[in-house]
Amino acid sequence: DTAVSQTPKYLVTQMGNDKSIKCEQNLGHDTMYWYKQDSKKFLKIMFSYNNKELIINETVPNRFSPKSPDKAHLNLHINSLELGDSAVYFCASSQDPRPTEAFFGQGTRLTVV
Amino acid sequence: GENVEQHPSTLSVQEGDSAVIKCTYSDSASNYFPWYKQELGKRPQLIIDIRSNVGEKKDQRIAVTLNKTAKHFSLHITETQPEDSAVYFCAAISNDYKLSFGAGTTVTVRA
């Protein structure tokens, strides 16, 4: 059983399109995250949700909108995609808002052409 | 916010030798320091962590040390094997609940 699963694994799309990435965790964790890993491998927090409530919202363009329908799911919707959005997006979860022992999903490689 | 710096950015070692990666952090309130290993095309995986009330922790061939006064922590891998080749990230959690990562170290173990 995959603990944190993301779909799709790969996403290639044109500039200006709107796309979504879905994430689900079956660990019973209360907190979920989105991280962005750029081409230089740098990992940076984007959003954090605890029990469906937004608790961290980093300096991310408002074209990115996370949605948490329940504590086991955290989806990421991106409007008007730009070339610079190309990256690997990782979903993660942890038991509580302090991301100790955070567990990462396998990542979604987004390529904007 | 927390700023984590990691060195070196690349490290090549002969199989069987040791590898050491060093990180510094800026926020003295940080109290949890995990290390993640990311193999090519895979997800980051937690391999070891240390909390601020502990100076050293060991798990088989890997060990971490923490110097709170100097605000630095290190990962030590002994008897390196080819499967240790990966990108290693240090990180720190401060009171803002954010997991701040270092820039990563690409470790290559030469057979």
Image: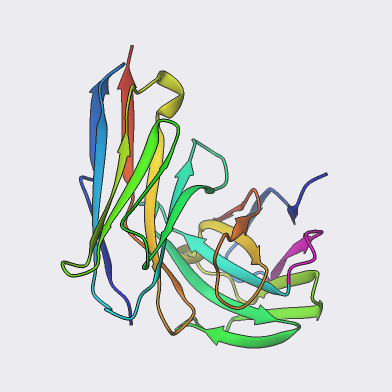
Highlighted magenta segment, given as a residue range = A18-29
Rendered position, B43 above or below B51: above
Which residue is most to the left? B70
Asked if one can make out residue A7 in the rendered structure from this viewpoint, the answer is no
In the rendered image, the quadrant that contains the C terminus of chain B is top left
Q: Is residue A112 left or right of residue A69?
A: left
Residue A14 or residue B36, whichever sits in front: B36
Rendered position, B104 above or below A100: above
Rendered position, B99 above or below A14: below
Q: Residue at x 48, y 63 (%)?
A: A83
Instruction: Check the image and tell me how it is coloured.
Output: rainbow
**Magenta span includes A4:** no
In the rendered image, the quadrant that contains the N terminus of chain B is bottom left
Where is residue A66 shown, x and y percent of the image? Answer: 68, 79
> Residue B76 sits in which quadrant?
top left
Asked if one can make out residue B55 in the rendered structure from this viewpoint, the answer is yes
Q: Residue at x 53, y 85 (%)?
A: A57
Q: How many tags in the picture?
A: 0
> Residue B6 sits in which quadrant?
bottom left
Q: Is residue A18 left or right of residue A80?
A: right
